[in-house]
Image (cartoon, rainbow, N blue to C red):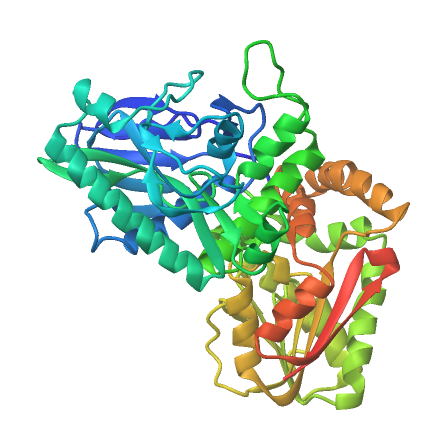
C-alpha cells in the first residue's frame, strides 16, 4: 500500500488549492472546500519525508464521526465525506488562531513547566504539579496558525483581542464552543476507556456565523490516555499509556530531532513507517470502537472507486491466465492445500456446500469429487472467472452437481441456514467488508455446520520469512505481469497478503462473527493458513 502524499486535482469551478502540512484543500467557486486528508505526517511543525499508509483516511473518518456527534453544540463545516480521505464542506473565513484546550499537564506544557514556566498564554499554572496531572479545570492555551515550515506560537487571549484577531464577542463564543466540545469529546472518550488529555479546534465564519472547521478529536490533533491504570501510573511517576501522535515526537527526539535549525530528520525506514501505520490503526480502533482492516483499503488500481468493483475488474482481466499463474506461483503446492482443507470436511459429509469467491472453480471441483455432496454452489463477483469455471465443470462432467452464481459476499441472497458447509479458498482477503462477509457466511450456514478458509499468509520465521519477502516483492509481480499482462494485479496480491489479519488475530475475527471452535493451522512454513470453525 502506497501512501498518498500529494494530490493535483482539477475540479470543476476550482479557484485555488492550498497544500497544508498534511491536507490539500481545494477552493470550489469560493463557496465550498474539498479537503483531502493525505498520508503526509508532520511533527514539530515539519512535514516528514515519508507518508504513512492509511493515516489520512483514518483521521478523516475519525473527524467525520466527531463532527457528526457535535452538531448540537455548534455548526460545523462538513457537508459530506464522499471518500474515506475526503471531506466536502462550506468555505469559512478562518480565525488565524488555534484554540488549544488542555485537561492535563503533559507534552510541551509539561516541558515548559519543568523548566520553571508558570504561565502559558496568559493562564497561570498552580505550583507543585506533576507530569500528567489533571488541571483543576481545563485551560485554553491558543496558538497562532503557522504556515508550512514555520512554528505555531503561543498567544494569550489579551494579545488576540489587542491584535484584532477576534472581537471580544467572537472570542467569547470561541471559548464557549471550545469548552463544550472538549466536554463532549471527554464523554465519548470515557465510553471507549480513554481520557481526552488535550486537543485543538479551529473556527471560522460563514454567513456571519462561527463554524467549527477542520478535524476534531483525531490522534493528530488530540492526545488520549488509557483510563485503566492512569491513577496507578500517575502515583508511581510512570509514563502514561497514551494514544496520540506523541510516540512520533518521542521517536524523533530520541534520534536528535525537535525541528530546530540544523537538525536532520532521522531515516524513516520501511519498518518505522509500518510501525507508525500500525499505531495509527490502533488509535483508530480505540477511538471509534470499530475494527480497521488494512487489506479492505488496498485496491488493485489505486484509490478511486470501491474495492469490490476494482477486484471484479481485476479478476475479469486475469481470468484466462489465472489457473496457469496460480499453479506456477505456488509451484503446484496449492493443490495439496486444497486437499487438506477438504480432508477436514470429509468426516462431516456435508450435503449442500457453498464455495465463496470460487474463482475458476478449482476448489469446488475437487470438493465435489472428494466429498460427493448433493449440490455445490460457487459464488463470486467475477463472471470472467466463473465462465472459466463453468467450462472446467462441464469438462469434468459435474454440471449436474456444481452451479455458479454471481453474489456479493457481504450481502448473500440465500436464506438462513441453507448450507452444511461454507468454504473460501484464497479469496477472503479480497472482501471489501471482512466482518460483514464472515457474518453473512455464518448466517447461511446451518447450526452445527462447518466453515473452512484457506488463505495465503506471510511466514514469521527465519529463513522462510526473508525468502518469502523477496519472492513476494520481486518474483510474484514480475511473473504475474508477464503472464497475465495486468500491471497491477500481482502487485496487489502480495500487498493484500501482508495486510491481511493472520493466525490468532484472524481466529478472533472469525469467532466474533458468530463461529465457535475456531482453529487454525499454518501450512508449508506459514505460506498458507487453514482456518476451520463450527457454527
In the picture as drawn, the residue positioned furthest to the top comes out as 262
Give the side of residue 98 with respect to residue 6, left or right. Answer: left
Q: Is residue 397 visible?
A: no
The structure residue drawn at horizontal position 74% and vertical position 36%, both measured from the top left corner, is 478
What is the quadrant of the N terminus in the image?
A: top right
Give the side of residue 180 with respect to residue 235, left or right. Answer: left
Q: How many callouts does the rendering have?
A: 0
Give the side of residue 423 with respect to residue 408, left or right. Answer: right
Which quadrant of the structure image shows residue 334?
bottom right
Q: Nearer the viewer, residue 436 or 427?
A: 436
Which quadrant of the structure image shows residue 532?
bottom right
What is the quadrant of the C terminus in the image?
A: bottom right
Q: Nearer the viewer, residue 263 or 328?
A: 263
Residue 201: percent from the left, percent from the top?
32, 38
The structure residue drawn at horizontal position 26% and vertical position 24%, both measured from the top left corner, is 96
Residue 236 lies, with reference to residue 1, above or below; the image says: below
Residue 164: percent from the left, percent from the top?
16, 20
Q: Is residue 346 visible?
A: yes
Which quadrant of the structure image shows residue 349?
bottom right
Residue 302: percent from the left, percent from the top?
51, 39
Residue 256: percent from the left, percent from the top?
66, 21
Give the side of residue 464 with respect to residue 192, left or right. Answer: right
The structure residue drawn at horizontal position 54% and vertical position 88%, both measured from the top left corner, is 417
Q: Nearer the viewer, residue 224 or 346?
A: 224
The structure residue drawn at horizontal position 75% and vertical position 89%, both measured from the top left corner, is 348
In the picture as drawn, the residue positioned furthest to the left comes out as 208
In the picture as drawn, the residue positioned furthest to the front comes out as 127
Residue 327 lies, with reference to residue 415, above or below; the image says: above
Amino acid at each position: 500500500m502506497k501512501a498518498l502524499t500529494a494530490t493535483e486535482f482539477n475540479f470543476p469551478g476550482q479557484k485555488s488549492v492550498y497544500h497544508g502540512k498534511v491536507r490539500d484543500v481545494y477552493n470550489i467557486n469560493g463557496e465550498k472546500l474539498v479537503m483531502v486528508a493525505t498520508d503526509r505526517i508532520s511533527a514539530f511543525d515539519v512535514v516528514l519525508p515519508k507518508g504513512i499508509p492509511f493515516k489520512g483516511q483514518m483521521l478523516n473518518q475519525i473527524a467525520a464521526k466527531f463532527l457528526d456527534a457535535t452538531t448540537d453544540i455548534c455548526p460545523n463545516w462538513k457537508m459530506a465525506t464522499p471518500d474515506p480521505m475526503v471531506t466536502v464542506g462550506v468555505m469559512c473565513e478562518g480565525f488565524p488562531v488555534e484554540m488549544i484546550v488542555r485537561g492535563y499537564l503533559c507534552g510541551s506544557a509539561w516541558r515548559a513547566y519543568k523548566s520553571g514556566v508558570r504561565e502559558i498564554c496568559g493562564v497561570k499554572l498552580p505550583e507543585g504539579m506533576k507530569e500528567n496531572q489533571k488541571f483543576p479545570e481545563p485551560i485554553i492555551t491558543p496558538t497562532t496558525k503557522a504556515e508550512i515550515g514555520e512554528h505555531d506560537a503561543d498567544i494569550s487571549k489579551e494579545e488576540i483581542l489587542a491584535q484584532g484577531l477576534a472581537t471580544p464577542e467572537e472570542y467569547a463564543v470561541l471559548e464557549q464552543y471550545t469548552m463544550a466540545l472538549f466536554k463532549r469529546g471527554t464523554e465519548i472518550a470515557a465510553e471507549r476507556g480513554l481520557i481526552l488529555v488535550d486537543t485543538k479546534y479551529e473556527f471560522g465564519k460563514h454567513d456571519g456565523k462561527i463554524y467549527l472547521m477542520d478535524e476534531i478529536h483525531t490522534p493528530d490533533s488530540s492526545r488520549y490516555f488509557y483510563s485503566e491504570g492512569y491513577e496507578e501510573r500517575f502515583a508511581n511517576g510512570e509514563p502514561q499509556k497514551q494514544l496520540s501522535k506523541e510516540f512520533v515526537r518521542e521517536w524523533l527526539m530520541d534520534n536528535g530531532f525537535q525541528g530546530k535549525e540544523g537538525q536532520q530528520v532521522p531515516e524513516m525506514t520501511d519498518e518505522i513507517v509500518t510501525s507508525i501505520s500500525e499505531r495509527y490503526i490502533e488509535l483508530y480502533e480505540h477511538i471509534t470502537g470499530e475494527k480497521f482492516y488494512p487489506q479492505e483499503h488496498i485496491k488493485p488500481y489505486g484509490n478511486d472507486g470501491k474495492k469490490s468493483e476494482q477486484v471484479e475488474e481485476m479478476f475479469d482481466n486475469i481470468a484466462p491466465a489465472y489457473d496457469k499463474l496460480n499453479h506456477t506461483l505456488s509451484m503446484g503446492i496449492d493443490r495439496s492445500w486444497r486437499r487438506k482443507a477438504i480432508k477436514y470436511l470429509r468426516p462431516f459429509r456435508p450435503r449442500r456446500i457453498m464455495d465463496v469467491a470460487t474463482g475458476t472453480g478449482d476448489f469446488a471441483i475437487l470438493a465435489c469429487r472428494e466429498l460427493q455432496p448433493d449440490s455445490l454452489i460457487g459464488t463470486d463477483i467475477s463472471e470472467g472467472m466463473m465462465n472459466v469455471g463453468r467450462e472446467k465443470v462441464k469438462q469434468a462432467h459435474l454440471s449436474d452437481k456444481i452451479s455458479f452464481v454471481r453474489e456479493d459476499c457481504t450481502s448473500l441472497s440465500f436464506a438462513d441456514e441453507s448450507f452444511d458447509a461454507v468454504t473460501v479458498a484464497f479469496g477472503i482477503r479480497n472482501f471489501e467488508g471482512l466482518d460483514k462477509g464472515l457474518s453473512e457466511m455464518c448466517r447461511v450456514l446451518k447450526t452445527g455446520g462447518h466453515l473452512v478458509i484457506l488463505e495465503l499468509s506471510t511466514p514469521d520465521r527465519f529463513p522462510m520469512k526473508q525468502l518469502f519477502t523477496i519472492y513476494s516483492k520481486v518474483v510474484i509481480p514480475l511473473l504475474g505481469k508477464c503472464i497475465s499482462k495486468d500491471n497491477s494485479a500481482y502487485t496487489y496480491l502480495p500487498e493484500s497478503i501482508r495486510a491481511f489479519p493472520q493466525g490468532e488475530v484472524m481466529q478472533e475475527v472469525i469467532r466474533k462473527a458468530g463461529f465457535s471452535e475456531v482453529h487454525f493451522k499454518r501450512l508449508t512454513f506459514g505460506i498458507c493458513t487453514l482456518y476451520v470453525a463450527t457454527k
